[in-house]
Each structure stands twice: as structure tokens, then as C-alpha cells.
Amino acid sequence: MKIINVETYLFRSSRNYLLVKIETDDGIVGWGDATLNGREMVVQILVDNYLKDLLVGTDASKINEIWQMIYVGTYWRGGPIMMTALAGVDMALWDIKGKYAEMPLVDLIGGRFREKVEVYSHVHGRNADELVESVKRKKAEGFQNLRYSFDSRDHHSDMIFTQPHQDIVQGHFEKSSIESLADFWDSRVYAQDLIRITDRLRKEFGMTLGLIHDVHGRLSLSAAKEVCRELEKMHLMFIEDPIDSKKTNGLEEIRNTSTTPIGIGELFNSIDECRALISKHHIDYLRIDISHFGGITPSLRAAALSDVFDVKMAFHGPSDISPVAHAACYHIDSSISNFGIQEYVDFEQEVKDVFKMPYTYDNGFVTINNTPGLGVEIDENQLMECDEYMKSYLPILRDMMSAIHNW
Ligand code: GCO
Ligand code: MG
């Protein structure tokens, strides 16, 4: 089962995506997702100019060995660019293996633990009233778990601070200078609003609705400690990235002062960045992104390690990774014993025209079907019809004291 070709496809279908396609000499084709929001072209150059040469001629069935050869063999290992490229290759190889074995990924990795996986969706409101209405709409669609975000208004300056949500994650397309990308942000106003709005949601909807809030690393350690303590009695499912997730030494302090569960991981690119957090149980949910963590192979290891230390998996599932990556998550979610929850996105129809999905949403749960491999069928004719890639930038956030925050 020799690899005879590796191709990349960079295109725009409501937003930008980068796919990796690997072909073998026995006619099997595998697809992987290598989309890195805002830096897609760099990943493409890496796959086309470096990884392709290494891959052509090798045996596609040896996934573990190929993965290590690229990961360790690069010497300058890790980082989002490299690990996203490697993820694209890894997913395509698992897709090939499943198609060869005529088995869905979920069966290759141990079989179904559950028939359907519980998911959460996003709700956003420009104020508390609007948010309450959005929650009602999503509940009517069957969602029992919601990640909520809102805009904050500073009543002194009348400035409005927007939190990241699905509609704006694509970032800015216009040619911009660093300064023009900067949004302002007052974390004191936000922290107060977060407590007030969460309380309102609990009063409106009671205690059983699963509530998740993504701080996106925008709070200082002391503010995060205070917020997590205040939110304790409101019983979130978890708070995500309460502090900058690249400075995780502070998590222990948050942990020791509150019982609000913590989810973290979308910015991690390897197990080295989360090994200690897992083994010391400083987090409750590991939220790695399959496309930025090196793919299925290392994600299975991270899930197994988390299981040992009683940490649950809640894979990152935003619209800026393609349905190929989402399908891979649903396969893993269906098979592992320590599944927590999965972030869900309903893709636009134009995306569904390119990617024929192997999964269906129903009443708060997703079921992955038995199509071999990852199961996503790519309509290459539709793909060729898609718009051209458009370079975009994520916003930059600057707080009132001029420090640069995570967006
Ligand atoms: C989430 C995330 C995303 C990110 C996005 C950046 O938890 O879903 O924080 O919305 O902001 O993936 O590209
Ligand atoms: Mg997040």
C-alpha cells in the first residue's frame, strides 16, 4: 500500500479550508484536514514542499512510524504550523486504513462505546435579553448544553466589547495594519457582566441546562480566580481557558480556590503541553483540537492518558476546521470511555455541498455512521467550483491599559 501522491487543496467555502489528499498505488484515497485559521498558506507550503517528498514511496499502513518520522525527524518539532500539517497527513492515513479494512474509524480504534455523542452549540447575545432569546431558540432545536457569549457595554465610555463567537471567528479580510486589527477590551467590565449574565441564565432556565463559557484567555490570574469562585454556585459544566492557556502554571491556584470545572486545550500542539495538567488533575476537560494537535494518532494517546487520570475529553470543534476533522472527533468520541462533550457546528449548505457528512445531528446528539475510514466523501467537482482562498487575519485584542490579550 505505497503512497503515490500527496495533494493539497486550499479553497473557500463560506470560510477558508485546507485539505490534504493522499493516494495509494492500490487506488485508495484518504482525506485529512490541515486548516489553521489565519495561517493556512504556510501549512500548505510545508505539506507540498517538505512532507510530500518524505511520504511518496512509503507504506501508508505504517501510521505510527510515519507520524514519529515526521514529528521527531523534523528535529524542530511541534508548533501549530507543523502539527496542523502533520494532522492533515495523519487523518488522511487513517482514512486510507479504514477504507482498506472496510471499517469506520470508530471500529478500528476499539468500537462503539456509545451510539450517539452529546454535543454543545454556541449562543450569543448583544445583551442579556437577547442571549435569553438565543438560548430559547437553541433549546427548541434540542440542545441541552450551550456555550454562551455576550457583548459587554462600558456604561462610562459607552464602548462595546464583543466576545468571540461563531459569526466573527473568520477574522478580517481587508488589508490591515496591526493597529487597525486591534479591538479594545475592558476585562473588569467583562468579569462583572459574566457573573451577572450567568446568574440571569440560571434564573431563567434552572440548573439542568449545561452551561459553558469560553473566557478565551482574557482574564488575569487574580480576576480568573475571583470569577471562578463567584461562578461556583452557578454550576457551569466548565469554564474554558480562564487564563492564557500558554501560561498554565496559574491553573493550580484557580483549582485550589474554586470548584468551577476547567476546560482547556485548543492551543496545545502536543502532549508535552498538557501532560502535567492532566496528571495533576488541574483540568476537568481536555479540549485539544485534532487538526492542531497532530491528528488522530496523538489525540488517541492524549485521550488515553486523560482517562487514566479521570480527565474527560471535550474536543475543540469550531467552524474553522473542516467537517473532515469534525468527523474524526465524532469517531473518537464514540469510542472512548472518558468522553465528556463535543463542540458542535452546523455547517453552511455550501460546505455540505463539498463535504458529504457521515454524521447526523438529532436532538442534542450526533451519530456517526458506518462509512469506512473517516467517512467524509469529498465532491471534487464542487470543490473546484468553490471560491478562491482569501487571506484573513484574526482580531487583536488590547486592554484599556494597552496590554495585548488573547483575542
Ligand atoms: C472555541 C474557540 C474558537 C476559536 C477559534 C479561533 O472554543 O470554539 O475558542 O471559537 O476562537 O477556533 O480560530
Ligand atoms: Mg475556545
Image: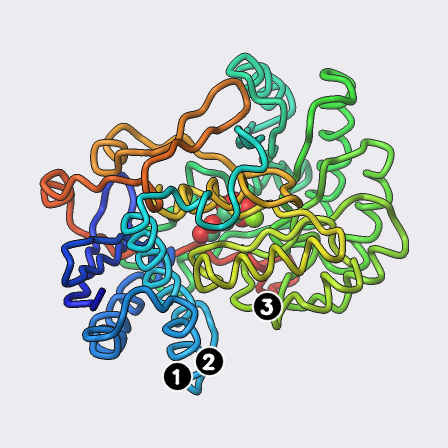
Q: Residue 21 location, x and y as percent?
A: 22, 57
Of residue 79 and residue 336, the one placed in the foreground of this image is: 336
> On the image, numbered disc 2 is attached to which residue?
77
Q: Residues within 10 Å of mark 1 (few under 14, many from 20)?
A: few
Q: Residues within 10 Å of mark 2 (few under 14, many from 20)?
A: few
Q: Residue furthest front?
A: 101
Under circle 1, the secondary element is loop
Q: Residue furthest top?
A: 140
Label 1 with label 2: CB-CB less than 8 Å: yes
Above or below 85: residue 330: above
Report how far apart the C-alphas of labels 1 and 2 lie in the structure: 6 Å
Q: Is residue 342 found left or right of 59 in the rendered image?
A: right
Numbered circle sitting on residue 271: 3
Q: Is residue 195 found left or right of 344 in the rendered image?
A: right
Callout 2 amino acid:
Arg
Which residue is found at the position 62% from the left and 67% from the top? 246
> On the image, numbered disc 1 is attached to which residue?
74
Which residue is found at the position 52% from the left and 66% from the top? 269
Which residue is found at the position 44% from the left and 64% from the top? 294
Q: Earlier in the sequence, mark 3 or mark 2?
A: 2
Q: Is mark 3 within 8 Å of ligand 2?
A: no
Callout 3 amino acid:
Ile
Locate the N terminus and report the quarter of the image it occupies. Answer: bottom left
Give residue 158's quadrant in the image: top right
Give residue 53's quadrant in the image: bottom left
Above or below 228: residue 254: below
Callout 1 amino acid:
Thr
| Residue 13 appears in the rendering | yes
